[in-house]
Image (cartoon, grey):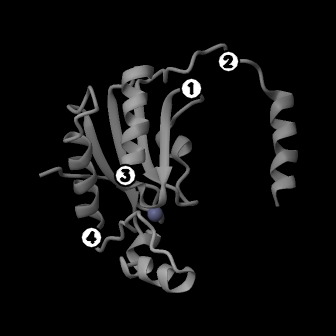
Amino acid sequence: MTDRLVEANRRYAEAFTDPGMDASPVLHVAVVACMDARLDLHQALGLQLGDCHTIRNAGGVVTDDVIRSLTISQRKLGTRSIVLIHHTGCGLEALTEDFRTELEMEIGQRPSWAVESFRDVDQDVRQSMQRVRTSPFLLHTDDVRGFVFDVRTGLLREVDPA
Ligand SMILES: [Zn+2]
């Protein structure tokens, strides 16, 4: 499978020209989103190469590592706005924290990380916004907005932070 990707990259590089930009995102925005394969962030948000930072993991959860990336994004690369995107039909809705126990039973070691499973996607987005807003490491927490992406319609729905 990976060979197919490497082959596609050769064709990509043939048509590629150096955009001549530095590492700071042009739109000064960082997007935190779920890794879900149905969510094409650049297409869905009309983003071009160099426009934004994209930080993705299972669920689009604001973990310590996401805060690490956002802190570098804001303090070293000049972003000011944060967009959080969760989505309908997320795999984390089907999991519980029991997954950690299952892993422990299977391999004899319980992971140090939380599964961060959830039942209510809106509440999960609100919690993520809260984690970002209360982080002491971030310079800019005034422009933090959260959305749910509908994988069937392609439309974003904004979540009220209150
Ligand atoms: Zn997901």
Q: Residues within 10 Å of mark 3 (few under 14, many from 20)?
A: some
Q: Which residue is mark 3?
A: 63
Q: Residues within 10 Å of mark 2 (few under 14, many from 20)?
A: few
Q: Nearer the viewer, mark 1 or mark 3?
A: 3
Q: Residue at x 41, y 64 (%)?
A: 112
Q: Residue at x 40, y 39 (%)?
A: 68
**Quadrant of the snapshot with the N terminus:** bottom right
Give the camera-side residue of 118 and 38: 118
Mark 2 CB near ligand 1 (8 Å cut)? no
Q: Is residue 65 above or below residue 10?
A: below
Q: Which residue is mark 2?
A: 19
- Return the disc, 4 or 1, that comes first in the chain's sequence: 1
In this view, the residue farthest toward the left is 162
Based on the displayed image, in which of its 4 quarters is residue 70 positioned? top left
Under circle 1, the secondary element is loop
Image mark for residue 50 = 1
- Return the disc, 2 or 4, that comes first in the chain's sequence: 2
Under circle 2, the secondary element is loop
Q: Residue at x 36, y 48 (%)?
A: 64
Give the camera-side residue of 137 and 3: 137
Question: Can residue 83 be seen in this snapshot?
Answer: yes
Q: Nearer the viewer, mark 3 or mark 2?
A: 3
- Return the disc, 4 or 3, that comes first in the chain's sequence: 3
Kindly report the distance in space between the C-alpha atoms of the residues bearing marks 1 and 3.
Answer: 24 Å
> Which amino acid, mark 3?
Thr
Q: Is residue 24 above or below residue 147?
A: above
